[in-house]
Amino acid sequence: MDSERLARVKRKLEALNYDGDLDPKSAPLAEKLVDDLLNATNSYKSLKLRLTKQSKAQDNWEAKLMTLKQENAALLEENSQLRLQLIHNDELCDEKLRRAFAESCKLQRSVTELKFWKEQAIQRNVQFERLHDEIRGRLKSGNYQVVSAEQDAQARMELTAMLDTANIENHRNVNVLISGADDRAAALQE
C-alpha cells in the first residue's frame, strides 16, 4: 500500500479517536474496516433521521386519526338519531295513511248511501209527478167522480202507505203532502 493511502487511513482512524500505530500490512484491512464503519455510521445517521421524520409523521397521522375517530363517533350518533327520527316519522305517516284510508272508506260508504237515497227520492218524485199528472188530467177532463167516504179513506190509506214506504225523514214535507192530498180530495168531492 502506498504512503498516501496509509496516511489517509491514519487520518480517518484519528478522526474516529483511534490512536495507535498502523502496520502497513494491516492497512488494507483497516482501510476496509474504516470505510465499512463510516458507511455504517452514515447509514445509522440517515436511518435515525428518517426514523425521526417518520415518527413525527406518525404522530401527525395519529392525531388526524384521533380527530377522525371523534368525528366518526359524532356522525354515528347523529346518524342513529336521524334514523330514529325517520322511523318515528314513518310510523306517523303510516298512521295518517291508515286514518285517511279509513276516512276515505267511510266517505265512500256515505256517498254510496247518499246515491241510493237520491235514487229513491228521484223515484218517489217521479211517482208523485205521475200521480199529480193523473189527478190534473182527471180535473181537466172534467171526469169528476163523487168519492165516497170509504173511497176517500182508501185513497188516504194508499197515500199514507206510499209515504211510509218512501221513508221521508222531513215530517213537515209529509204533512204538506198529506194536506195537499186532502185539499185535492176535498176539491174532487165538491
Image (cartoon, rainbow, N blue to C red):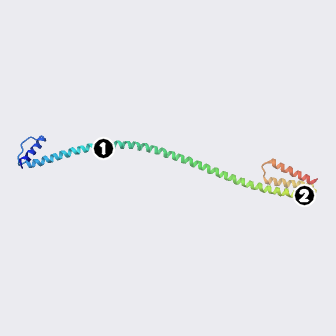
| The quadrant where residue 71 appears | top left
Q: Nearer the viewer, residue 21 or 78?
A: 21
Q: In what element is the residue under mark 2?
A: helix
Residue assigned mark 1: 57
> Is 4 positioned to the left or the right of 61 in the image?
left
Q: Position of residue 15 (x, y in %)?
A: 13, 41
The amino acid type found where label 2 is placed reads Lys
Q: Image point 51% across, 47% down: which residue? A: 86
The amino acid type found where label 1 is placed reads Ala
Mark pair 2, 1: CA separation = 117 Å
> Is 139 positioned to the left or the right of 97 in the image?
right
In this rendering, is residue 90 above or below 140? above
Q: In what element is the residue under mark 1?
A: helix
> Is 186 positioned to the left or the right of 79 in the image?
right
Q: Residues within 10 Å of mark 2 (few under 14, many from 20)?
A: few
Residue assigned mark 2: 140
Asked whether disc 2 touches disc 1, contact meaning CB atoms under 8 Å apart, the reply is: no
Q: Nearer the viewer, residue 92 or 26?
A: 26
Q: Residues within 10 Å of mark 1 (few under 14, many from 20)?
A: few
Q: Image point 67% across, 51% down: which residue? A: 107
Q: Image point 86% across, 54% down: which residue? A: 157
Q: Position of residue 35 (x, y in %)?
A: 14, 47
Q: Position of residue 147 (x, y in %)?
A: 92, 56
Q: Image point 27% across, 43% down: which residue? A: 53
| The quadrant where residue 128 appears | bottom right
Q: Position of residue 14 (x, y in %)?
A: 11, 41
